Amino acid sequence: MSSKRPNQLFRNLNAKIASVPMILTAMVVFFGGTIWTIVYSFTNSKLLPREKWVGFDQYERLWNTNRWLISIENLLIYGILSMVFSLVIGFVLAALLDQKIRFENTFRSIMLYPYALSFIVTGLVWQWLLNPDLGIPKVVRALGWESFDFDPLYNADIVIYGILIAGLWQGTGLIMCLMLAGMRGIDEDIWKASRVDGIPAWKTYIFIVIPMMRPVFITTLVIIASGLVRVYDLVVAQTGGGPGIASEVPAKYVYDMMFLGQNLGQGFAASTMMLITVAIILIPWAYLEFGGKRRG
Amino acid sequence: MKSIRMIFAATTALFAASAVHATDLEVTHWWTSGGEAAAVAELAKAFDATGNKWVDGAIAGGGSTARPIMISRITGGDPMAATQFNHGLQAQELVEAGLMRDLTGVAEKENWKDVVAAPSLLESCTLDGKIYCVPVNIHSWQWLWLSNKAFEDVGVAVPTNWEEFVAAAPKLREAGKVPLALGGQAWQRRGLFDVLLISLGGKELYNKIYQDKDAEAARSEDTAKIFKAAADAREMSEGSNVQDWNQATNMVITDKAGGQVMGDWAQGEFQVAGEVAGEDYTCLPGLGDNALLTTNGDAFYFPVLNDEEKSAAQEELASVMFDAKTQVAFNLKKGSLPIRKDVDLNAANDCMKKGLAILEKGDVIASADQLVTPDTATQIEGMFTEFFSDMSITPEDAQERFAELIENAD
Amino acid sequence: MVDPTGITLHGEVGAGADGGPRGPRPRRRFSRRNIFIYGTLIVVSVYYLLPLYVMIVTSLKGMPEIRLGNIFAPPMEITFQPWVKAWAQACTGLNCDGLSRGFMNSVIITVPSVIISIVIASVNGYALANWRFKGADVFFTILIFGAFIPYQVMLYPMVIILREMGIYGTLGGLVLVHTVFGMPILTLLFRNYFTSIPEELFKAARVDGAGFWTIYFKIMLPMSLPIFVVAMIIQITGIWNDFLFGVVYTRPDTYPMTVQLNNIVNSVQGVKEYNVNMAATLLTGLVPLVIYFISGKLFVRGIAAGAVKG
């Protein structure tokens, strides 16, 4: 395309210079930090990193720790439910807002505003709303439903759902916005055509609109998933991992091991497991995303 | 590595631009409850009186929130001038890495060794014969705080020991009160067990388990009794939906709960609420069974700074903290006992006097934090958090898991 | 309160008549449909608004009223005392000047962090979208990988990196941290946005001999207001709400508002003062909230552009 043809290294030189911050971040912080973490997970570092190699000891202990297993289970439950509910709720709300309704802006703002609040604030508010002595449970009982004892934050079996309620409250608005944006990008003619053919609206959504919104779903998934690993803040603010250890999550295990237990090695081993999981999910995605359609 | 750290310690923060005077010292701590804040104000007042300035860096949420921040700042090369830290093994590595100031000079000049009331606490500040921290008080965990009014309400005499308390529990329950207030944080739950272990099991059993890491002792019949008692406590604490220790204390103050097992720092809360020992509340050291106290305590460490003026001010602060007058003022507010034995505590109330008497008799033992590593402590805490909130864990199972942790402790 | 059951019942009927404007007589169908749509939206709105309502109402009540009353009841006696206390009097340790101390600090931290992180990410996204060079995708993949790493895991490596660079504890260090951790999502958004700009425009400029920076400043930038708004909103919210880095990389005089908030909420002196806590929470959230409500429309448009094209 361009008139000059400089050699390979200097091709797009400006672009390469402009990408230096990204390359540094990717290589030094994310890649370097990851490698560093993995290396030190094979040591018995306590408060400060040190090179005393212990092989797989830290991993053995990790997988023999009840708290870690519960953390994983919680993240799995929370992760799957939050993905499903975020996508479904986000999509349905977006579809409703897409019906050329009045007050669209108002409704959208109402659904989106919680996203402006931090997880810390979200956790506090819902901790309070779900408090059995003060919040919703008390009100329901006061209304006459005496036996109502939905107290997710103090019941180990359902505490993770209490956190889910708060997490969805905070995050679904953004997902809804993304979906809505995706729907707006779809050609009006497709709707006309499906109306002419007499296809019901819900069928059009499922079989035509959703497949066309693939890129939106990918962005959405990235955002939901990256939010998942941050669920730490929410748990800390809402339950502190309790009751007991019923709502522990992996990131909290890492943090507590590193800074409370002063056992960096153990914390790093747990981080490594988390990082590996992310890589397992991400590498096939990157392959599909970039491997297939590499064009000049 | 060390020298690099020193160099970076010197890089002044952009933020610090406002701190023009070299004698401004930033002190971080996690004392934010009513009684604690009043106590820390005494320290600040005393330090400000020397012409320096105490810059308060309180971080709420307890040691578990504050400690990571402190550790990252110290290892990151941007240390505060002084920081609260628990005694024991927590700070040892930071000392070994040369990040903490050696206070031996001050300590020798002022004869700390001769006047200290709990030598074991100064001992925990010492590494290779050098002193690295200032112990500021003596705390003991083994107290049962009872609300006189709560027992009056249900027509039972205020218990004088743990057994009577357990016996009175059903009456309290019937009256809609929570017999035993217990906060949700992990350290409170492990603390409760340790208190039961010392007060009901005695010194020997305690030392065998925590000092000698004797797993056999942990599996013994005697320990099984302690776990039974812990199960009683678990039942009695059902329904105390609070997180912080002082919220639990507040349940006792407001007579919603019968009692709480908590360290003597709870005293500060009763004081702030205007309650009088003996009239409004009763305190039973050693749960009324075995008047034995552990000597925990708070201590301040002074990270190495590259600024000479600040370093000099650090030593001044260390000296102020240990000073007899500061000690009295501080400890009266905090509810703890002074670290010096040469101070006059006429102003002390009933409970503190009881504590002093036990201390004088020498019925004291090292606290668990001085005996086990933070790693083991965290694991034990995790186990007890689970135990105290999950009714389905039998005392037997819990005991076995506890014994395993003791076995593997390093 | 609205009776939700009644509305959903109507809604189901509406949904059964598979909504699309298919047959004749659209009017009646429309009204049924509308009941379903508006009904659902109102019920959902209640769920979203409830916490905000409770926070506001509680922050205007006195403590006795909170202890006795129903959290949903409007205040019997409105008091602004909790707000005053949260802003100017609440204590942590020795400092009894509430949130006011943290406000300016938060501004000082947020403004440069937002600007620098966005500038860098936008140029990156532009390079990735229009000037792909060999290996760019590999770096990009690693960068996206970074979006999934919890901050807590990277805290220690980050402390070491900053220490070795000699900027630990400086404003520069804090800005760098926010730039690094904001980069994955921002770069993704910018890259997607710039890809969606018609390639012909870019090619024409190239033919005219415009270089990397000329195209960026003369063509791309003027067309990108919506995505910049999105990036700003995401960054302002994220940085304003950050607690972990804020507390680790600052000193007491420069603690941001969130640290103050944590301190107020977690410093229990006697009883928990829910009204003060709620007021403090609202005050802290006010800046991002205002930005959201002001820029609502642009936000959606920007999101649309940044997310649609993969």
Image (cartoon, coloured by chain):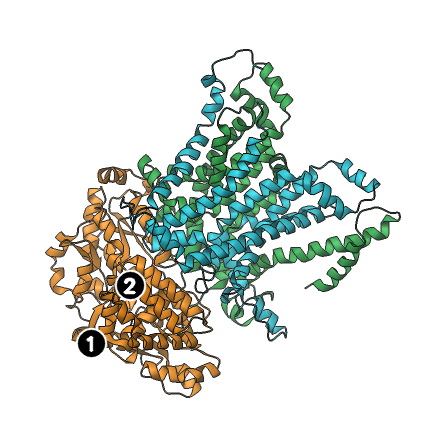
Chain colours: A cyan, B orange, C green
Query: x, y (%) of residue B48?
Result: 25, 54
Q: Is residue C98 visible?
A: no
Give the vertical position of C50 relative to A51 (above or below): below
**Residue B213 occupies quadrant:** bottom left
Q: Which mark, residue B266?
A: none
- Kind of residue indicated by mark 2: Glu
Query: x, y (%) of residue B27?
Result: 29, 52
A261 or C111: nearer the viewer:
A261
Q: Is residue C75 visible?
A: yes
* Residue occupied by mark 2: B407
Q: Which mark, residue B357?
A: 1
Judge from the rendering whether residue B213 lies leftward or rightward of residue A114; answer left or right. Answer: left
B348 or C306: nearer the viewer:
C306
- Looking at marks 1 and 2 on the same chain, the residue that comes earlier in the sequence is marked by 1
Q: CA distance from mark 1 to mark 2?
A: 36 Å
* Residue at the limit of the structure toward the right, as seen here: C24
Judge from the rendering whether residue B29 lies leftward or rightward of residue B183; answer left or right. Answer: left
Q: Residues within 10 Å of mark 2 (few under 14, many from 20)?
A: some
Q: Secondary structure at mark 2?
A: helix
Which quarter of the rendering shows the N terminus of chain B?
Answer: top left
* Residue at the limit of the structure toward the top, as seen here: A3
The residue that appears at 47% across and 27% down in the rendered structure is A19
Which quarter of the rendering shows the C terminus of chain B?
Answer: bottom left
Q: Residues within 10 Å of mark 1 (few under 14, many from 20)?
A: few
Give the vertical position of A210 relative to A75 (above or below): above
